Image (cartoon, rainbow, N blue to C red):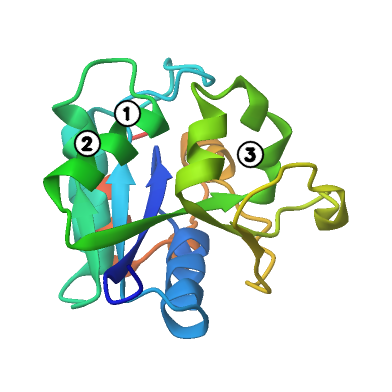
């Protein structure tokens, strides 16, 4: 079992992907036992509002642009092909069956632990997958109440959000340093979030 490559799954709307996402992915690759990270672009989180979501294609392209030629990260559209709404357990099960030579782990922000009991079959995730948790503002990591292979990481605390970026773009603010250069260009060229 331990000889399997550990692949971290970083789920997100990536609406848009920003430097906070990239810094966390980079941290997980360099400071955990993960061999690689797949950025899973989610079509629609059942617990989030769909209204401000850029089309799937654009969000996937932004993730691909941000990752560039990094050999240990990849953008994944696996959830685009699965039934909607997408549930993490279904994606984990699908990937585990499709890639039996890999071991998958979940990367999540500490804030997700607040609603984790609302996730479909969350007990199965706890029983079968490692979870790497990165800190989020206003969440005490000492209060984790779940039993399972949960690793609390010392990843940098990122107080940047995609909603902040979307709001800033709507207001005409220059937020180029919050985004990878290619993502910043892509948003401008496609007129996203205006």
Name the residue rendered at 63%, 32% in the picture: 116
Name the residue rendered at 31%, 60% in the picture: 103
Q: CA distance from mark 2 to mark 3?
A: 22 Å
Q: CA distance from mark 1 to mark 2?
A: 6 Å
**Do tag 2 and tag 3 residues touch (Cβ < 8 Å)?**
no
User: What is the quadrant of residue 74 in the picture?
Assistant: bottom left
- Nearer to us of marks 2 and 3 is 2
Residue 101 image point, x, y percent: 17, 62
Residue 94: give its label.
2
| Viewer-closest of 75 and 96 | 96
Name the residue rendered at 44%, 57% in the picture: 18
| Side (left or right) of 144 relative to 13 | right
Q: Is residue 56 visible?
A: yes
Residue 146 image point, x, y percent: 72, 42
- Give the labeled residue for mark 3: 112
Secondary structure category for the residue under label 2:
helix
Secondary structure category for the residue under label 3:
helix
- Give the labeled residue for mark 1: 90
Q: Of label 2 and label 3, which has the lower sequence position? A: 2
Q: Of label 1 and label 3, which has the lower sequence position? A: 1
Residue 67 image point, x, y percent: 25, 67
């Amino acid at each position: 079992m331990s000889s399997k490559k550990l692949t971290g799954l970083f789920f997100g709307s990536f609406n848009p992907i920003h430097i906070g996402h990239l810094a966390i992915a980079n941290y997980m690759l360099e400071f955990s036992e993960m061999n690689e990270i797949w950025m899973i672009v989610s079509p629609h989180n059942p617990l989030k509002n769909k209204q401000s979501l850029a089309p799937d294609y654009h969000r996937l392209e932004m993730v691909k642009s941000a990752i560039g030629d990094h050999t240990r990260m990849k953008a994944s559209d696996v959830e685009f092909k699965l039934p909607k709404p997408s549930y993490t357990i279904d994606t984990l099960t699908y990937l585990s069956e499709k890639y039996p030579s890999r071991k998958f782990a979940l990367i999540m922000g500490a804030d997700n632990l607040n609603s984790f009991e609302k996730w479909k079959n969350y007990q199965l995730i706890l029983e079968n997958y490692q979870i790497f948790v990165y800190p989020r503002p206003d969440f005490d990591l000492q209060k984790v109440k779940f039993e399972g292979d949960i690793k609390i990481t010392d990843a940098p605390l990122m107080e940047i959000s995609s909603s902040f970026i979307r709001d800033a773009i709507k207001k005409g603010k220059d937020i180029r340093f919050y985004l990878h250069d290619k993502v910043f260009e892509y948003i401008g060229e496609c007129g996203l979030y205006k």
